[in-house]
Image: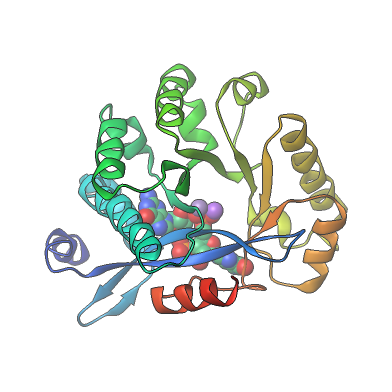
Amino acid sequence: LQLQMELRGALERREFLLHYQPKVDLASGRISGFEALLRWQHPVRGLVPPLQFISILEDTGLIIPVGEWVVRTVCEQLAHWQAVGITPRPVAINLSARQFQQCNLDTTIAAILDETGIDPGLLELELTESMLMSNPDDAARMLNTMRAHGVRLSVDDFGTGYSSLAYLKRFPLDALKIDRAFIRDVCTDADDATIALAIINLAHSLKLKVIAEGVESEDQLQFLRAQGCDEMQGYYFAKPLAIADCTRALVEDR
Ligand code: G
Ligand code: G
Ligand code: MN
Ligand code: NA
């Protein structure tokens, strides 16, 4: 309850910030994009991790204005990189079910893209299987509208939910992200390896990119590369980075 009260004014007090975790292309070794991850810089508690406050934002509806702030901040960052001559890479944003169910999400995002003037292909939305499958017809409509604006779409934590393959084929998606639960023991657990390979093959047969989340070791990287995984994300390459480190990584990656 205390946190809930403190969260109410956090946006106005400018206490939120974003960290950006690089995604790496396994063929070239270069940064292929980033995932933006919300952080709350509390004046007394310090940096509060999202697990402690995202659910409060969702329950109170604060996720709507905060989520809009996330989209705007990412688009402004992309415009800034462009303005200073750094070729930006796509940045993915996590959406909550509450945001995705909002019927005006598309107009909100379109307005921000318009205001900031960025290439819409630089913005990616990460959705979970449950968000897509709880009402697949509504989801398809929203995805088609976002796709028409040029935004990229991916499925987060893939493999943990229940996806209808018929819908997966129908949705205008760009990528599947293999949940890190399957990556953790992928080199030692035959079941996890089988699941990871199945997701890689499924993605490729649907002409989607596939990204492994939570890659923490060279062994995992080698295994995933050998199985044909396209991209990886995880502590082995980089933790979520503050913006200055992110810009440095982009400059060094040119
Ligand atoms: O950064 P971290 O690994 O602690 O993130 C924990 C969880 O919080 C992840 O499941 C992630 O999807 C979620 N999360 C992080 N940033 C955002 C955000 O901007 N919006 C939403 N809705 N969820 C986020
Ligand atoms: O649910 P989602 O996939 O959006 O969650 C992203 C979360 O995963 C973030 O909180 C991020 O900090 C965390 N994360 C990113 N890379 C790794 C990793 O290599 N290992 C672990 N354990 N967590 C990671
Ligand atoms: Mn995510
Ligand atoms: Na993820």
Of 143 and 30, the residue lying toward us: 30
114 to the left or right of 171 = left
Name the residue: 60% across, 72% down: 253
Coloring basis for residues: rainbow
Can you tell me which quadrant of the image ligand 2 is in?
Answer: bottom right
How far from the left and from the top, in percent, is residue 220? 79, 65
- When the figure is inspected, residue 226 is found, relative to residue 137, above or below; the finding is below
- When the figure is inspected, residue 170 is found, relative to residue 129, above or below; the finding is above
Name the residue: 24% across, 75% down: 42
190 to the left or right of 158 = right
User: For residue 216, which quarter of the picture?
Assistant: bottom right
Name the residue: 61% across, 41% down: 175
How far from the left and from the top, in percent, is residue 218? 79, 73
User: For residue 146, which quarter of the picture?
Assistant: top left
Quadrant the C terminus occupies: bottom right
How far from the left and from the top, in percent, is residue 22? 56, 65
- When the figure is inspected, residue 100 is found, relative to residue 78, above or below; the finding is above
How far from the left and from the top, in percent, is residue 189? 84, 58
Name the residue: 77% across, 48% down: 196
Quadrant the N terminus occupies: bottom left
